[in-house]
Image (tube, rainbow, N blue to C red):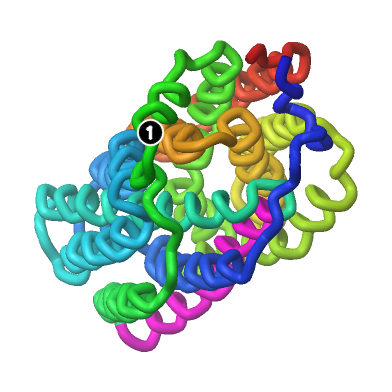
Amino acid sequence: MMPDPSKNGSKEPVDVATSSTWVFLVAIVISGITTFMFYPLITLELIDRGVGAGATGLILGLLSGTGQILSGLIGVVNARLGSKTLAIGGLALRSVGLLVFAFDSSILLYAVGAVVASLGSSSTALALKTELMRASSDRRTITMRSIAVNLGALVGPSIGGVVFVVASFSVIVLSVVTSYVLLGLGLLFVTFKPPEESGPGTKTRVRSDGRQLDWLFFVLIGCTLAYWGIYSQWPLVVPLYAESGFGTPLGSSWVYTGNAILILVLQYPLLVKLLKPVRSSYVLALGFLLFVGSFLVLPIPAGPATVILFATLFSLAELLVSPTLDEVTAQLRREGTGLTRAYGTTATAAGVSSLIGASAGGALIEHFDSPASVMYVAVPLAVLGFTGAVVLSRRKARS
């Protein structure tokens, strides 16, 4: 029997973070800053350019989900070519795809650009994540990675909001692309671990790691589908609900900034300190319950208080669920190429859910003319995630 992966305090050897851990954390922060410079504003910009809410939802789904859908394949490429090649190549694709959004164009070109940018984004993210987890996969390191992402999310919207007011959305995109080019050049001088499948005996390890997925991993995939389907509603709801509640299009940047601050302040003390002895499955269950609460706020007429309440509950749920899913994945697939392929598999599930969720959410908003309508998607998904967490808490994985 292997240890219950829903328990944090297993007797498995704990990885020790190295100096490379901090290098990749810094890269994640930089990538996060640039991403969140434009992400909170892209919905409003597309709508201002005459793109309908349904098409905007589809484009956002392609932007967040396409690369994730193909992450299983990206994981195979990562294992064979190495994270350095994937990280730098991903930044190049990301830059090319986002350039489309610097100009007033057609829905088709926006969709193509979103697909290319998404492939690049997922490639870079998976490469940096894999390198970081190969150095250390304990709860502390996973939480630090999440904090790094949200540190970028804190700074990015503020910079993007200022540039949006004094210049334009196109200037934001061009600035982001420039930063990606500079980051790629910087990574050329960073030492990465060799590809996972480059050494002798690799084929044997791959066959061993490629054993059939146990049922518990499928439950984890179900929780992943639920989380990303829920999260895909965030960039659709926040710009509309925040603008209505605060009376300004900058409201979305304020919400994104508040989301990042709350996560930065609470995530480490909650997950690493207060909830350290708590099984990860219980943490997941609590997070999904908070998601239910957050979306039940949306039918209330938008105002500063309701926007803040929605964002607070959503942020608390996010800070609990997101890193905990990574923690359970690492516990289930620690050895050899299993880790890279497992993250690729869960990312693929996340991409499918993001694409379907964003498209469904956009269609609901367009049909009902209200951001509150996304609750018809989000609440059932939160219940599904809660159910999966309960199953994880009651059963053990078999070796």
Instruction: Measuring from the top left, give residue 165's x and y in whole percent.
Output: 40, 82
Pick the front one: 210 or 8: 210
Q: Is residue 220 left or right of residue 205?
A: right
Residue for point 38% across, 67% down: 38
User: Is residue 254 in view from this perspective?
Assistant: no
- In which quadrant is the N terminus drawn? top right
Say few, some or many: other residues with alpha carbon within 10 Å of mark 1 (under 14 / 14 to 19 / 20 or more).
many
Residue for point 81% across, 51% down: 272
Is residue 290 located in the magenta-colored stretch of the structure?
no
Pick the front one: 283 or 296: 283
- In which quadrant is the C terminus drawn? top right
As displayed, is residue 377 above or below residue 291?
above
Instruction: Measuring from the top left, give residue 95's x and y in whole percent.
Output: 24, 67
Q: Magenta part of the protein: which range?
A: 141-167
Q: Decide whether the magenta segment is chiefly helix, strand or loop.
A: helix
Instruction: Measuring from the top left, give residue 370's x and y in whole percent.
Output: 45, 40
Is residue 148 located in the magenta-colored stretch of the structure?
yes
Which residue is outermost to the bottom?
Answer: 166
Q: Is residue 104 left or right of residue 147?
A: left
Residue for point 55% across, 50% down: 134
Q: Quadrant of residue 349?
A: top left
Q: Quadrant of residue 348?
A: top left
Instruction: Measuring from the top left, give residue 148's x and y in whole percent.
Output: 60, 64
Q: Quadrant of residue 70?
A: top left
Residue for point 59% across, 64% down: 21
As displayed, is residue 138 above or below residue 26?
above
Pick the front one: 216 or 362: 216
Which residue is outermost to the front?
Answer: 200
Amino acid identity at mark 1: Thr
Residue bearing mark 1: 348
Secondary element under disc 1, as helix, strand or loop, is: helix
